[in-house]
Amino acid sequence: MDRITTVAGVRAAVSAARARGQRIALVPTMGALHAGHVALVRAAAGGDGAAGDAPGAGEFVVVSIFVNPTQFGPDEDFGSYPRDLDADERALTALGTATPAAVYAPTVREVYPRWDPEHGADLATSVSVSGLTERLCGASRPGHFDGVCTVVTKLLNQVDPDVAYFGRKDFQQLQVLRRMVADLDVDVELVAVPTVREPDGVATSSRNAYLDEPDRVAARSLSRALSAAVRRARASREAGRPVEAEVLRDAATATLEGEPRARIDYVEVVDPETLGPPDHTPAAERDAAAARGGEERELLVAVAAHVGSARLIDNVVVGDAADEQRLLDATG
Ligand code: AMP
């Protein structure tokens, strides 16, 4: 596995791989790698995340590690975000056959040549997706998605991958990037990887490192809130009633409110495509279901809460049987 730190270097490595006939896969991360990132890397390597998967013969996998300053707000954790490139490289090397071909770890100045901590990136150009970014995390983190879209555009331009892997844990980010790629005709396939969870159901996150023991226990309230919503949806189905957004929201909110150490940022139930309000009157849902041949519509249940100094997020798509089951299996 090579460590590459410059745009010129990654372009040269990618052109050589492409000349050999390899397909280029990119896994963008901010480092502090954990099992969630590993699932993305394994998927990129051509496996389904199971141990022993061999990499796809034609894949040249690049894992980028870059803590992007422009997606952090002024009061957020850019300064304290965990950074340990050597440990990240050891974790990737330990993946054996799924070890990527290269780690691309540019400095802030390599990505933003005019960067200075006081004035920021000083870009005259940025990428902004409207609509999808207005709610959920976009509402409480102004400018965050502009930073994400701009840096992902830069990474896609620098690495020029055929395919890029993103986690469903950041569901809004995934939908925003899908829209950006579609709107701007970016020639890349985006692949979504299911959320990886700790044994107690907590979504694996670099920010879990900020949690002391009581806060780590309190962090379970997010995935429990989601499983309460899924159980409520299942009860509605069993009773032959439509699954109503408001009922799911109440179930998730009640569970999160039961955890005094969690300060709720939002509990939202939205359309997973538009991230806007679902048309949630029972009659409208029945009509919509009938129009889809009796199939239930999907609803994204998304939660965000501050626990200790960490801001944590999680989500499930109700009506997506596989996503529901993965969550229930993980939360017990
Ligand atoms: P980050 O380093 O937090 O910016 O995350 C890099 C990528 O890993 C993003 O596409 C995330 O959605 C994904 N990711 C982070 N945590 C998880 C997780 N627990 N399960 C699956 N993907 C994840």
Image (cartoon, helix red, strand yellow):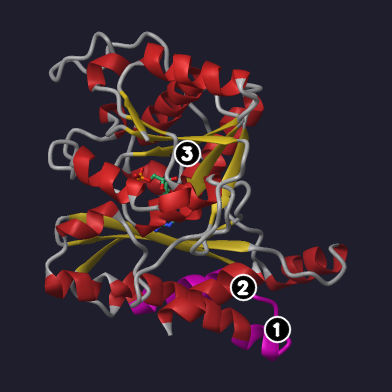
What span is colored magenta in the figure?
Answer: 235-255
Q: Is residue 332 above or below residue 295?
A: below
Mark 1, other Cα within 10 Å: few <14 / some 14–19 / many ≥20: few
Asked whether 217 or 137 is in front, the reply is: 217
Q: Does the magenta run of residues contain 238?
A: yes
Asked whether 325 or 101 is in front, the reply is: 101
The answer to which image quadrant residue 144 occupies is top left
Q: Does the magenta run of residues contain 130?
A: no
Residue 181 position, x and y percent, is 60, 29
State the count of labels: 3
Label 1 to label 2, Cα distance in Å?
9 Å
Label 1 to label 3, Cα distance in Å?
32 Å
Kindly identify which residue carries mark 2. Answer: 244
Residue at the extreme bottom: 239
Tags 1 and 3 in contact by the CB under 8 Å rule? no
**N-term mark: 3 or 2:** 3
Kindly identify which residue carries mark 3. Answer: 133
Q: Is residue 62 above or below residue 32?
A: above
Q: Is residue 20 above or below residue 72?
A: above
**N-term mark: 1 or 3:** 3
Question: Is residue 275 at least partly visible in the picture?
Answer: no
Tags 1 and 2 in contact by the CB under 8 Å rule? yes
Q: Magenta stretch mostly in which secondary structure?
A: helix
Query: Residue sitting at 65 percent across and 30 percent down?
Result: 182
Kindly identify which residue carries mark 1. Answer: 241
Amino acid tagged 1: Arg
Quadrant location, the C terminus: bottom left
- Tell whether 300 sits left or right of 107: right
Label 1 CB less than 8 angstroms from ligand 1:
no
Amino acid tagged 2: Glu
Question: Is disc 1 placed on a helix, strand or loop?
Answer: loop
